[in-house]
Image (tube, helix red, strand yellow):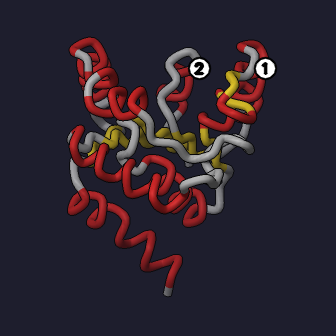
Amino acid sequence: MKIAIIGYSGSGKSTLAKLLSEYYQIPLLYLDTVHFTANWMEREKEERARLVREFLQNGSWVIDGNYTKLFYEERLEQADQIIFMNFSRWNCFFRACKRYRTYKNQTRESMADGCNEKMDFEFAKWILWDSRTKTRRAHFRQIIDSYPKKVTVIRNQRELDRFTAPFKKAIFT
């Protein structure tokens, strides 16, 4: 099983990726841990590529994140399932604020060591506007059109709950 989880910041990609990784007992790669090193410094381009290329050699995996320069097409091609987290901008912003309150001054598992949770103007602007340009929306639509048999679109918490219920039941009972 190979699962690519894409979508907007704050939509719950990392949480879903962890759940699916635990359920299927397959390796998980958070692309934020590849892109960044401590204190939000960007990792060298060649090193990022090497880490993702090596991870893609696994027979099964879950990969969380967009990062179009990190073997994006290869990930989508190889994936048995692509999950697009398409929550509204305001829902993503609310979720990111909630996450910030929970992890303030801490590093989440889905981030590189030393990258403490933050919520600043730049990130808020990214969630609300910059990540939702016409070009980016068209890019996501193109993925849905290119891989219709393996894309699942999750638009809200109710759909996410419905999608994850069988996995949670199996893991937590």
Q: Secondary structure at mark 2?
A: loop
Other residues around mark 1 within 10 Å, as few (<14) / some (14–19) / many (≥20)? few
In front here: 12 or 2?
12
Tell me what residue is drawn at x 45 percent, y 58 percent. Answer: 101
User: Residue 45: x, y in percent?
Assistant: 71, 13
Please give the count of numbered marks on the rendered protein.
2
Q: Which residue is mark 1?
A: 47
User: Residue 146: x, y in percent?
Assistant: 31, 22
Q: Which residue is mark 2?
A: 71
Q: Which quadrant of the view contains residue 43?
A: top right
In front here: 35 or 82?
35
Mark 1 vs mark 2, CA separation in Å: 13 Å
Residue 160 shown left or right of residue 99 in the figure: left
Mark 2: amino acid: Phe
Reply above or below: 47 against 65. above
Reply above or below: 81 against 44. below
